[in-house]
């Protein structure tokens, strides 16, 4: 907590991977478990953006993207 009574959410774990397909492109997505949240509250995020911020979480193998 900081002085404004807010805190920074931190990704704790990558739970799953998938490809989101649209007409023109495919986007690699990862299901992220955030700090202070339950598994049911995990969210799908763009893999590239998560790799930039949380590269240490990608030491596991993701079968969809081959990462």
Image (tube, rainbow, N blue to C red):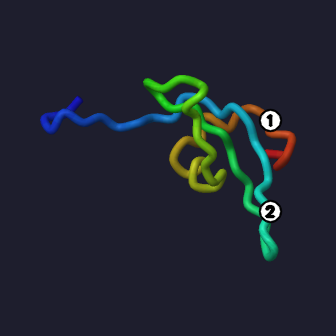
Q: Are marks 2 and 1 in contact (CB under 8 Å)?
A: no
Upstream in the sequence, badge 2 or badge 1?
Answer: 2
- For residue 54, which quarter of the picture? top right
Q: Which percent across, then down, holds residue 29? A: 70, 50
Across and down, in percent, residue 61 comes to 80, 35
Foreground of the two, 61 or 8: 8
Determine whether 37 is above or below 44 in the image.
Answer: above
Question: Which residue is at the front of the view, 50 or 32?
Answer: 32
Q: Residue at x 15, y 38 (%)?
A: 4
The quadrant in which the C terminus is found is top right
> In screen coordinates, is 46 left or right of 36?
right
> What's the CA distance linking mark 2 and mark 1?
21 Å
Please, which residue is most extreme toward the bottom here? 24
Q: Residue at x 66, y 51 (%)?
A: 47
Residue 35 is left or right of residue 30, and the answer is left
Is 39 placed above or below 55 here?
above
From the image, tell me which residue sits under label 2.
21
In this view, 24 is above or below 58: below
| Outermost residue toward the left in this view | 3
Q: Nearer the viewer, residue 39 or 29?
A: 39
View extreme (front): residue = 40
Tell me the SS state at disc 2.
strand
Give the residue displayed 19% in from the left and 33% down from the top: 5
Judge from the rendering whether residue 43 lies leftward or rightward of residue 15; answer left or right. left
Q: Tell me the SS state at disc 1.
A: loop
> Which residue carries the number 1 mark?
61
């Amino acid at each position: 907590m900081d002085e404004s009574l807010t805190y920074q959410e931190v990704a704790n774990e990558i739970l799953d991977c998938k490809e989101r397909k649209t007409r023109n492109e495919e986007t690699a997505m990862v299901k992220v478990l955030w700090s202070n949240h339950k598994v049911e509250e995990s969210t799908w995020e763009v893999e590239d953006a998560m790799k930039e911020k949380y590269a240490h979480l990608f030491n596991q193998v993701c079968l969809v993207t081959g990462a």
